[in-house]
Image: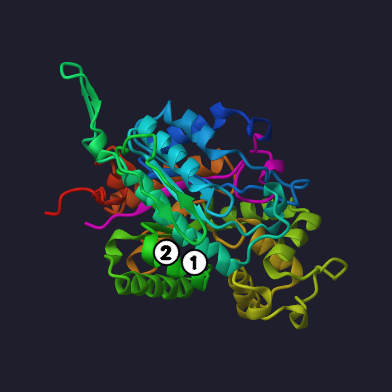
């Protein structure tokens, strides 16, 4: 029976922009590794598929008002791997601002030390301020970033295959440690990258990490169709999620791949209470803690317009909105403009809609209502599972694990025990054969 795939998406303090200010918050622990280890252990006890860490190679402009610094995920996930046994470990890494050889080594090491639990959230980086951290005058344009990403995937895939599965011999009697005939230079000389290889690390337990992709632009969907094994995406409505799901699955099939082997995982940030009114009151508590200076800056990033000085309780000035072509290709732009068109919010209402999870689906209700909504998307052709984005931590995840997951299990929609030890096994994905493996 088809079952949900569920990741815990970890953000320091929680996904609501004001989470760090709430009475349930523990902001003094956001740099304490034991805080994240405890979260991962709790998620593992709940039999979640993975913990997922976002990352970016620059400091967000709005850190003054929210806990939006960045922790380097390989170090953090290595520490988490040491205190867990089954849960997957998904790290974000940029194809624009990393080199493929170094990235291949980092992920190979994480997959080895975790026993096959690594996943790579592949991003091209949307933050233009990153460029000057790497000696560039300008951030590469969208199309160029994706062109490099395609070649980057070609290189790292070859590097992870450069050791055949049985290249490591370790035979003291013969004195042979490794069969050098089964270790291959990749000799890549492309338009953007030159890498000789081979990797200096043997092939990993999963063959290679699970390929995860985040981005719903046209270029992002085309990239996902050819490479992704899981897709992180943001939608506000069931209809929009269904449209995306049908579109990307058809693209995967057209690319000659099995759509059932690519998991579409939207984000959901649930406020949960014993009654719907209690859940909505909790959500309002968080919204009341938001700071317009932060919220307006985030909106500027999404829409490319400055609404400073406008009446927050007045309408969003639609005449200021750029067209999609003027704004560019970012998928979050479409999410926000869709909210404006569908709901006609005031500026303050729009800021509150985005405060919970930066354009991901925020919903408030009882455990039964949250379980119902998850089931509706899952059975209604909109999702294969979800990235759970608790609005606050740890409590926002505890209540989900204690009260929503048991309902999903009782409906046969989520596992009670792990069926395997690797992230690929959790997702029901095969271990890819090496390109050097004999043809069957």
In the rendered image, residue 42, in percent from the top left (x then y), is placed at 44, 34
Is disc 1 in contact with disc 2, using a CB cutoff of under 8 Å?
A: yes
> What residue is at 56 percent from the left and 62 percent from the top?
145
Residue 47 is marked as none
Residue toward you, 76 or 409: 76
> What residue is at 43 percent from the left and 26 percent from the top?
82
Q: Which residue is label 1 attached to?
A: 220
Give above or below for 430 relative to 84: below
Magenta span: chief secondary structure: loop
In the rendered image, residue 435, in percent from the top left (x then y), is placed at 26, 51
Gap in Å between the C-alphas at discs 1 and 2? 6 Å
Residue 53 in magenta stretch: no
> What residue is at 88 percent from the left and 67 percent from the top?
309
Residue ranking furthest to the bottom: 319
The magenta stretch is 1-26
Give above or below for 126 relative to 39: below
Q: What element carries label 2?
A: helix
């Amino acid at each position: 029976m088809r079952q949900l795939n569920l990741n815990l998406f970890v953000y320091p303090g929680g996904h609501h922009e004001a989470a760090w200010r709430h009475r349930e918050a523990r902001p003094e622990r956001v740099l304490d590794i034991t805080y994240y280890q405890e979260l991962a252990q709790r998620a593992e006890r709940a039999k979640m598929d993975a913990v997922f860490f976002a990352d970016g190679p620059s400091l967000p402009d709005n850190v003054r008002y929210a806990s939006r610094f960045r922790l380097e995920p390989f170090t953090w996930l290595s520490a988490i791997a040491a205190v867990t046994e089954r849960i997957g470990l998904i790290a974000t890494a940029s194809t624009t601002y990393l080199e493929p050889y170094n990235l291949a080594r980092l992920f190979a090491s994480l997959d080895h030390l975790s026993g096959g639990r690594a996943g790579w959230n592949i991003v091209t980086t949307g933050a233009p301020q990153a460029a000057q951290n790497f000696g560039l005058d300008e951030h590469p344009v969208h199309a160029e970033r994706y062109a490099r990403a395609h070649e980057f995937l070609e290189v790292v895939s070859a590097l992870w295959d450069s050791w055949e599965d049985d290249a490591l011999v370790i035979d003291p009697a013969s004195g042979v440690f490794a069969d050098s005939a089964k270790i291959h230079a990749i000799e890549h000389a492309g338009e953007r990258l030159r890498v000789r290889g081979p990797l200096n690390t043997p092939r990993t337990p999963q063959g290679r990490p699970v390929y995860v992709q985040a981005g719903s632009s046209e270029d992002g969907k085309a990239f996902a169709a050819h490479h992704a094994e899981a897709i992180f995406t943001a939608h506000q409505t069931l209809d929009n999620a269904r449209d995306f799901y049908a579109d990307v699955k058809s693209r995967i099939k057209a690319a000659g791949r099995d759509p059932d082997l690519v998991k579409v995982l939207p984000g959901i940030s649930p406020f949960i209470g014993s009654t719907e009114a209690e859940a909505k009151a909790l959500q309002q508590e968080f919204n009341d803690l938001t700071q317009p200076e932060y919220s307006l800056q985030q909106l500027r990033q999404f829409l490319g317009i400055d609404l400073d000085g406008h009446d927050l309780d007045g309408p969003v000035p639609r005449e200021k909105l750029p067209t999609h072509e003027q704004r560019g290709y970012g998928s979050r732009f479409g999410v926000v403009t869709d909210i404006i068109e569908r709901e006609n919010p005031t500026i303050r209402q729009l800021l509150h809609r985005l405060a919970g999870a930066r354009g991901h689906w925020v919903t408030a209700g009882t455990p039964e209502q949250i379980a119902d909504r998850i089931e509706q998307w899952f059975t209604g052709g909109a999702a294969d599972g979800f990235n759970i984005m608790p609005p606050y931590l740890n409590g926002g995840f505890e209540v989900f694990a204690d009260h929503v997951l048991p309902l999903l299990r009782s409906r046969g929609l989520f596992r009670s025990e792990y069926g395997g030890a690797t992230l690929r096994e959790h997702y029901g994905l095969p271990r890819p054969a090496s390109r050097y493996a004999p043809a069957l």
